Amino acid sequence: MDTGNGVCMDAFWLTAYLISSTAVLVFSLLLALLTWEHRRYVRSSLRAAKHHRPAGRVALFAPCKGLDLDLETNLRAILDQDYEDFEVLFIVESTDDPAYPAIRRAMAEHPSAPTQVIIAGRAFDSGQKVHNLRVATQYLSPRIKYLAFVDSDACPRPDWLRSLVARLDEPGWGAVTGYRWFVPKRATVANALIYSMNCDVVSLLTKSSHTLIWGGSWAIRREVFDAIELHKAWQGTLSDDLVASRLMRRHRLKVRFEPACVVGSPLDQSVGQAMSFIRRQYLVARFYTMDWWLFSLLSATFTNAIWVGNLAVFLWSLLGGACSPWIPVAISAALYAVTVYRGWLRQDLVRTYFARPEKALRRIRFFDIWANPLVELAHWLAIAISSAGRHVNWRGIRYHVLRNGRVEQILRLYQADQPAESAERPGLYRKAA
């Protein structure tokens, strides 16, 4: 009788293992299909980008804090946009910010570009970036037709702004967004991990599947910005883009992903910095898009569990279990083959997005293709760590965030080698005519 029960239990667990493995394999195949569709959509969209000729005044908002990698290169790229009617509004907390001199130098190099520097002052009830954007968008000129947003660690293409706002004239779209593609400065394990995780996210974006806005590259029509009261919704929050995404869903407005608006973002981090960065991304997502965070956690948990399960079943079969060792080997091989194919598709996109990839990026591409199980494990660890805690450290500031996403407390963390930040009142610096 005991032997019969043991056989039944073995059969039960073997059946559960086979069903779970099949589900993960099917899920991986669907992700591969999405990655293939992303590549097809990117190539089609980039061919069409050169024909975009939108018209209308654009206010381009660029909040800055600290010295990002290649900051002055990024600032010049922002000012060198192939669009006739736009103005750039750089926003800093104070003139003591290390980014401020770099902004002034970039402005001096582009004397014909209509630019402003807005001194936003310190944030007291929201994230500093959100506070900067609220100050900058408080009083908009009646001439403004579009609002566009770019991060200071982004290096956009010359046709970036034109491609971003062109899609807003098409019916049915509430906002248009790009995304980042990290460009590693060195071929290190930390850079490879964060690069691969980001590539995995980017490669799943297609024209109609993307509902989240990425705050480093996006645009919205002026009347939509006013109608959904985004300026008001930002008050007291930490995230600019996820709050905007939540409003889009609430008002049933679609967000379009535009491949021509994917921006290069320089990357050089330690392992600790990389894990802290990913944790912060998911922690903020937990505050504002719990459904998306839960899906990420469950899918990563399930996928990693199958890898561990394959190893356990293989060892069990060698010890005399009721399963051939070739079953977990075959499942692992099939799953790994799909991840390698997805990695190859992703890295085939590098020359599509970047005409001349940097040397470190060319070396790391092999890591992204062949080391996906390791990346999945690091990804799961970062998401799991984000399941606890309410403190977010972001650019020298610690925020305590409540369950509803409201910022309750702000603590400024200064480094000994950083200048004290002044508490200037919000103001505006205009470049001399």
Image (cartoon, grey):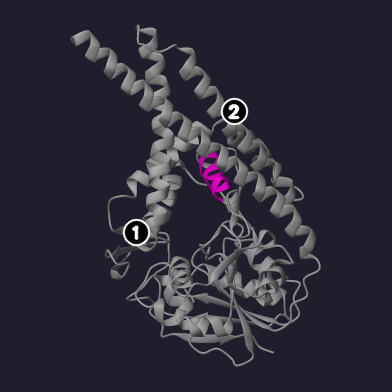
Q: Which residues are magenta?
A: 192-201
Q: Nearer the viewer, residue 299 or 182?
A: 299
Q: Image height check: is 84 above or below 303?
A: below
Q: Quadrant of the N terminus?
A: top left
Q: Main secondary structure of the magenta part?
A: helix
For image coordinates 74% across by 76% down, the residue present is 83
- Residue 85 placement (x, y as % from top left): 72, 82
Q: Which residue is mark 1?
A: 392
Q: Quadrant of residue 31?
A: top right
Lateral position of residue 390 relative to residue 94, left or right: left
Q: Is residue 107 magenta?
A: no
Task: Find residue 323 and report its horizontal and vertical position in percent.
Answer: 40, 13
Q: In the image shown, does 317 or 85 lie closer to the viewer?
A: 317
Q: Residues within 10 Å of mark 2 (few under 14, many from 20)?
A: few
Looking at this view, name the residue that lies furthest to the left.
1
Tell me the element at label 1.
Answer: strand
Q: Is residue 279 visible?
A: no
Instruction: Name which quarter of the figure residue 256 lies in.
Output: bottom right
Viewer can see residue 290: yes
Q: Residue at x 50, y 23 (%)?
A: 331
- The CA span between labels 2 and 1 is 37 Å
- Left or right: 41, with 235 as reference point: right
Residue under label 2? 337
Amino acid type of the residue tagged 2 in the rendering: Ala
